[in-house]
Amino acid sequence: MVPIPPDPRTHAHHHDTQQAEESLRGQLEGSGWTFVIPRPVSAAARLGLRAAPRADAAQVTEALPGEALERLWDDGHGWVYVRTVQDGYLGWTRLDGLTAPQGGETLTVTALRAHAFAGPKVSQPITGELCLGARVTRAPGEVVEEGGRRWVPVVLPDGTDAWVGETILLPLPGADPAALALRFLDTPYVWGGRSAWGLDCSGLSQLAFAAFGRPLPRDADQQQAALAAVTAPQRNDLAFFPGHVGVMLDDRRMVHANATHMRVTVETLGEGEYGQRLQAGCTGFGRWTP
């Protein structure tokens, strides 16, 4: 038997506790494994998923409000090992950040950042923080018009009744991930982040493509392996570097979340000191294909 690659990002198995997900039964070396059937849960709000069950452990990714997760096992001290369903990524998060999946009509937030309110008026208290890709449930009741604005009654992922402006739910125009990525300019860089409140390089590319139904894996190396390699980049191709990725705006310009500037910026490959370093370190380009 050839063992599976021990990639902790996508294969739920811990040798120290001898726990693994049921789908790996018969694929792991040794005996004494306890196999667990994943259970569906949701993120009650934005949740940092960490490399270990500790608050000071590195954030490896982020679950968005209402995002579908799978609960695998607990550490007995308030931490839970979970998987993000949309990209299969694993990490530890706090139990109190999880909730049961809601029924009913699901609405997806299309604004980069948004708030939910206690009532259908901008002066009402803010009851929730939302972002591109977050999911809320349509609540019973009619849309309310107020001051030229339209308010939709919703239930937030944590079960709170709230109202959101209809504009944060409107379909995105076109199918241009590069244009959407550009809207994130100056968003703070956050390791493991996946929202306009803070994100990393592969979080930006993943969000920009997912908004138009083009799924990508979580990390830069995974994204490079998933895409078709090309030598002459064009708009909406991805540029890859060791541990880094950016979205091409044309054959030379690239938008990316980077720790050099600690924000989302645009660079021209080969131009200026930073652009020259990027061009020298480029390991290739990838193109999303159906």
Image (cartoon, rainbow, N blue to C red):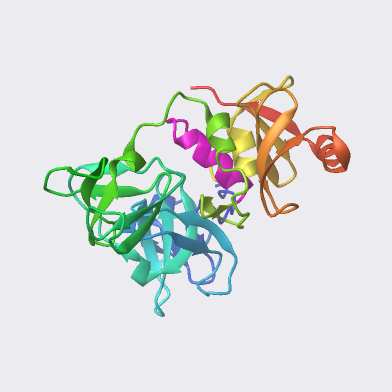
**Image label count:** 0
User: Can residue 46 be spotted in the picture?
Assistant: yes
The quarter of the displayed image where residue 59 is located? bottom right
State the image coordinates of residue 122 (x, y, percent, origin top left): 31, 54
Q: Residue pushed farthest left? A: 141
Foreground: 161 or 14? 161
Measured from the top left, where is residue 159 in percent x and y?
23, 61
Identify which residue is drawn at 43% across, 27% down: 173
Q: Tell me if I can see residue 38 in this picture.
A: no
The magenta segment: 200-214
- Say left or right for 67 vs 236: left
Quadrant in the rendering for residue 47: bottom left
Seen in the picture, residue 199 relative to 255 is either above or below; the reply is below
Q: Is residue 209 magenta?
A: yes
Residue 125 magenta-highlighted? no
Along the viewing direction, whichever of 5 and 113 lies nearer the viewer: 113
Near-viewer residue (244 or 259): 259
- Left or right: 79, with 247 as reference point: left
- Which residue: 85% across, 32% down? 270
The vertical placement of 238 against 160, above or below, is above
With 226 as the anchor, is 132 left or right in this view? left
**Residue 102, relative to residue 245: is it above or below?**
below
